[in-house]
Image (cartoon, rainbow, N blue to C red):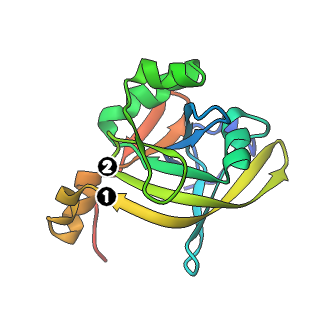
């Protein structure tokens, strides 16, 4: 196969060379109103202590809320919620939650909401933020994790099928992670 030049602007990637796990980041604003934001640029950074990072557009509501509250939730969505996640970007603040119909619940160890309908959650304490290019990166230490009990009742290889995570490919396109293989 002959390799050809490819654009370096991610907006021009069809297909995307870097798909990203889709999650909803949850936070409270200063009035304790819940906010959710879809993110697909999420990555583990450290095992000890467990630290993750995600990035987004600088100056948005999610960034402001996390800096004010020093914490955030990571909610793992499955394919049955994909259209709600893609649709929610057209609304802001509490309207996102009302329009998607998600139920917000209290986290166990942080002062941030979680989404009841999501099959797994991470609760994170803010470590730092940095500006990178046109965006920002938030680093959080994972202080609690939860997952639906039913997922852990099946054999290891079947757990991903039940978790049914989705990855962002490009605007309006996602893929399911539902075909696992062991090496």
Residue 92 sits above or below residue 146 on the image: above
Q: From the top left corner, tell me how far across and down residue 84 is, in percent.
A: 41, 26
Along the viewing direction, whichever of 83 and 104 lies nearer the viewer: 104
Looking at the image, which residue sits at the far bottom?
48
Q: Quadrant where the N terminus lies?
A: bottom right
Residue 146 sits above or below residue 100 on the image: below
Number of callouts in the render? 2
69 lies left or right of 165: right
The answer to whether the residue labelled 2 contacts the one labelled 1, judged by CB atoms less than 8 Å apart, is yes
Q: From the top left corner, tell me how far across and down residue 62 is, in percent.
A: 66, 39
Characterize the local packing of mark 2: few (<14), some (14-19) or many (20 or more) Cα atoms within 10 angstroms. many
Tell me where residue 52 sits by quadrant: bottom right
As helix, strand or loop, the secondary structure at mark 1 comes to strand
Looking at the image, which residue sits at the far left?
154
Tell me where residue 176 sits by quadrant: top left
Q: Identify the residue at horizontal 41%, vertical 23% (top origin).
A: 100
N-terminal label among 2 and 1: 2
Residue beneath label 2, please? 119
Q: Identify the residue at horizontal 21%, vertical 65% (top origin).
A: 152
Q: From the top left corner, tell me how far across and down residue 4 is, in percent.
A: 67, 49
Residue beneath label 1, please? 147
133 lies left or right of 22: right
Characterize the local packing of mark 1: few (<14), some (14-19) or many (20 or more) Cα atoms within 10 angstroms. some
Residue 70 sits above or below residue 143 on the image: above
């Amino acid at each position: 196969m002959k390799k050809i030049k490819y654009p370096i602007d991610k907006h021009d990637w069809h297909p995307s060379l870097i798909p990203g796990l889709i999650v909803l980041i949850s936070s409270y604003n200063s009035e304790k109103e819940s906010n959710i934001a879809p993110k697909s640029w999420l990555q583990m950074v450290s095992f000890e202590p467990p630290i993750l990072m995600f990035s987004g557009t600088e100056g948005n509501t999610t960034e402001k809320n996390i800096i004010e509250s020093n914490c955030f939730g990571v909610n793992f969505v499955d394919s049955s919620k994909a259209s709600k996640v893609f649709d929610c970007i057209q609304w802001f603040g509490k309207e996102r939650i009302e329009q998607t119909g998600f139920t917000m619940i209290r986290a166990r160890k942080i002062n941030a909401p979680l989404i009841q309908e999501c099959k797994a959650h991470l609760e994170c304490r803010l470590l730092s933020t940095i500006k990178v290019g046109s965006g920002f990166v938030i680093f959080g230490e994972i202080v609690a994790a939860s997952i639906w009990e039913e997922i852990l009742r099946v054999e290891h290889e079947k757990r991903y099928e039940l978790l049914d995570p989705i990855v962002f490919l490009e605007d309006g396109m996602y893929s399911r992670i539902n075909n696992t293989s062991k090496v």
